[in-house]
Image (cartoon, rainbow, N blue to C red):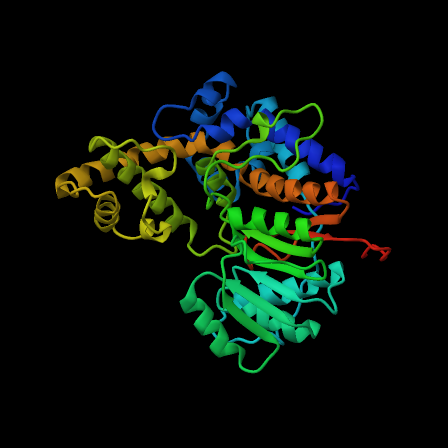
Amino acid sequence: MLRTEVVSASEHFREASRLLASVRDIVDERPEGVAPPSWCEARGWTAFLEAMPDDAVAAASRDGLAAHLDGLPGAPADLVALSHAVTRWTSLPAMPAASAEAVDGRRASPRKRVQVAAFAAMVGRVGAKGSRVVDVGSGHGHLTRHLASALGVDAEGWERDPDRVAVASSLAGEGGARFVAMDARDPAATLRSTDLVVGLHACGGLGDHAVRAAGAAGAAVALVGCCLQKREGDREALVVPAGMSARELTIGRAVLGLGNACDGEEGVEEAFAVRAASRVNRMALRSTLLAAGQAVGPGEEMRGVNRRQATGPLTALVERAFVARGLLPPPAEAVEAAARSAAEAYERARRWALPRAMLARLVEVWVALDRAAWLRSLGYEAEVLVAFEASVSPRNVAVLGWRDYGRARPR
């Protein structure tokens, strides 16, 4: 959803913060089984969700509850109002589409090329010409190389995986991009006030660190975040609006994973049916771990296992998860029983999950707004916008920040 009304940046951040604080009960309690979560009962939504026709549940699971709620008979007024508020305060201005023809296609998917082209067009808003580009978490260097060429500047990719650095360096040749094995959080990773710090899908805590480090150095920054839960510990707000408390805006690490949820089929790696099957597998895995006497917090069933493994056979997923915890895998009949139970529980749980899934974009957008608010507190100009269409990637919320130094604001 794109923003059409004009509101100030401070109002947008303040109202999104208040909205997030008002739904912390929903955000913090993840529906796990056949029983409705406590917030569903407390808010009086259980009867409505339970009575939703199966086809309406399927449509809302696919497209998002907010897309259908206005047309559903008996929808609670406060739930409808919440959907409208979420839509309003997650709406952002968007960059126009950019051509990817000039982007090097080596080891880059068509979607990655479009992301890089859109990012390069967006960087023009921060006036980066003549600066050094520092790409944090540069991976194979697609963005680093393209910005070096498109902007005519030196570009340095910081990537902590030496194997990726080797690949990126081999692709760079004699161009203006260089790559170093460097963790952006290392004290040796120093920035200059003339730098432009960039990150395309900078995961979790790296996104916060990049914004903080750029702000501390007085450097410009352009960042699209991703995987907010990939961090150590909970996330505390960088800025707390007046009249609110830090506690209201401190979000648990596991809960931040909600920000990666997305509706529909566009821009995602797996179809909705595959994602649903993955959810069933994760529920089954959780029950097997609990049966083995393991303490498993929300979202922790995949600890030590790549999330993509949840889309494969359940038996292999359970074996990997148990081995990662130093446990012997359960017998096959126990896994089969867990699979049957999880499939039945999912049909109920996905009804209860609909209001919570509606808040996924709110979590993601609010984190970006918080980062921008922090930059403004340092005297920066800052924007939050949609960098590219969801069909390219649903993780498309960008934060731009720059020191004004008398320069005209971009249009």
Image height of 224 relative to 235, above or below = below
Using the image as rendered, state which of residue 168 and residue 267 is in the foreground: 168
The C terminus, quarter of image: bottom right
**In this picture, is 338 found above or below 274?**
above
Q: Residue furthest bottom?
A: 174
Q: Position of residue 279 (x, y in %)?
A: 36, 42
**What residue is rendered at 75% in x and 45% in y?**
4
**Which residue is rendered at x = 44% and y = 40% of the image?**
58
- Say if residue 395 shows up in the picture: no
Q: Is residue 168 visible?
A: yes
Q: Nearer the viewer, residue 73 or 240?
A: 240
Q: Is residue 405 left or right of residue 84?
A: right
Q: Residue at x 64, y 70 (%)?
A: 147
Q: Position of residue 153 (x, y in %)?
A: 68, 72
- Pinpoint residue 104: horizontal percent, then vertical percent: 56, 76
Within the image, what quadrant is residue 405 found in? Answer: bottom right
Residue at 60% over, 25% down = 22
Picture mark count = 0
Q: Is residue 49 left or right of residue 309?
A: right
User: Against 273, is 366 above or below?
Assistant: above
Relative vertical location of residue 6 with respect to residue 20 in this rendering, above or below: below
Frontmost residue, 15 versus 148 = 148
In-image side of 170 versus 102 (left or right): left
Which is more toward the observer, 212 or 341? 212
Q: Position of residue 97 (x, y in %)?
A: 67, 63
